[in-house]
Amino acid sequence: MSARIISGTETAKQISEELKNEVAELKATRNIVPGLATVIVGCDGPSLTYVGNKVTMCEKLNMRPERHDLPADISEKELLALIACLNADPAVHGLLVQLPLPKHICETRVLMAISPLKDVDGLHPVNVGKVMIGEDGFLPCTPAGIHELLLRAEVAMEGAEVVVVGRSNIVGKPLASLLMQKRPGANATVTICHSQTRDLKQHTLRADVLIAAIGRPRCITADMVREGTVVIDVGTNEVGKTAEGKRILVGDVDFEAVKEKAAVITPVPGGVGPMTIIMLMKNTLKAAKLALGA
Ligand code: NDP
């Protein structure tokens, strides 16, 4: 039987309606418009697209985007000075620096310079630590989006065997921390695999919920998945361009074959991707409320 396909696009649409209402209420009751400042250094193609999408989504939800496009040769000192200004600006509630940064700038120093109270990407060590100890902070957007998708799709997570393939700081590690917490949509037994895992298939075949965040097209094949597994595909891999020059994206999962065995699966595109950006908006609204003490 073919899997139930969870649409991140549809779920993100529902959440965007909820957020729009909350934004309107904040404006009506407190005269506050959530503001998101995005900083981009240089003109790396995909980063420009990602930042453009974030700005557009802000506008759709009636939030205030503020975009700072900086030259690729800007010094770290100048970038840190801009971050300090944005940290101090009360109209800026959320602040993110698009990664990757040019080699001459230290990403860790930049991330640490962002106020943890405005860190809507959830990458500041204070927020990373809060995920680890289960305290309320800003969750990184992709793990938060996956958690929300699992919750809304009513996937049984309590006590489930979850296997996360990938241990990056933005996806694999925080996702594993989140899904092992004592909270709804989590409370799972989590295994993390990576490139040095001895027998990947032995782990993936045990999974009730298998999450692929690898960055390799169709790396998870049908023989690696048990019948009835919930499969979440984070991978976003460009494998070519259409005749019109549009990027052709595929996930880390061999979707066509795996969907015949899985119980539930997310597509690429239209799965985790739209959830990531809507979680950024949710975090920005949260930051605006936090600034009000609400
Ligand atoms: P990284 O490259 O930072 O991490 C990839 C992880 O996969 C690493 O831990 C690596 O292991 C592991 N890995 C690589 N090859 C194998 C293998 N053959 N077997 C097992 N593990 C392997 O990637 P990200 O976490 O940043 O992103 C992962 C994917 O998700 C990418 O396709 C990215 O584009 C996508 N992505 C999508 C988002 C969305 O919103 N949809 C958001 C963020 C990312 P090791 O640590 O040993 O190197």
Image (cartoon, grey):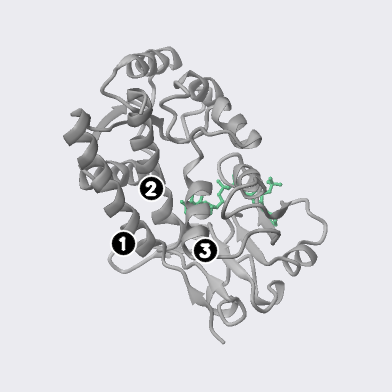
Residue 63 visible? no
Pick whichever of labels 1 and 2 is earlier in the sequence. Answer: 1
Check disc 1: other Cα within 10 Å, few if <14, some if 14-19, many if 20+: few
Residue 16 visible? yes
Q: What residue would you read off at disc 3?
A: 251
Residue 224 percent location from the top left of the image: 71, 71
Label 1 and label 3: CA atoms lie apart by 19 Å
Name the secondary structure under disc 2: helix
In the picture as drawn, the residue positioned furthest to the right comes out as 198
Residue 170 percent location from the top left of the image: 55, 41
**In this view, the mark in front (2 or 3):** 2
Q: Is mark 2 within 8 Å of ligand 1?
A: yes
Rendered position, 155 above or below 105: below
Pick whichever of labels 2 and 3 is earlier in the sequence. Answer: 3
The image quadrant that residue 202 belongs to is: bottom right
Amino acid type at circle 2 is Ile
Q: What residue would you read off at disc 2?
A: 277
Check disc 2: other Cα within 10 Å, few if <14, some if 14-19, many if 20+: many
The image quadrant that residue 38 belongs to is: top left
Q: Is mark 3 within 8 Å of ligand 1?
A: yes
Please tell me which residue lies in front, 79 or 143: 143
Name the secondary structure under disc 1: loop
Contact between labelled residues 3 and 2, with CB atoms less than 8 Å apart: no
Amino acid type at circle 3 is Gly
Pick whichever of labels 1 and 3 is earlier in the sequence. Answer: 1
Amino acid type at circle 1 is Gly
The residue sitting at 74% across, 70% down in the picture is 205
The residue sitting at 59% across, 67% down in the picture is 231
Rendered position, 203 above or below 52: below
**In this view, the mark in front (1 or 2):** 2
Q: What residue would you read off at disc 1?
A: 245
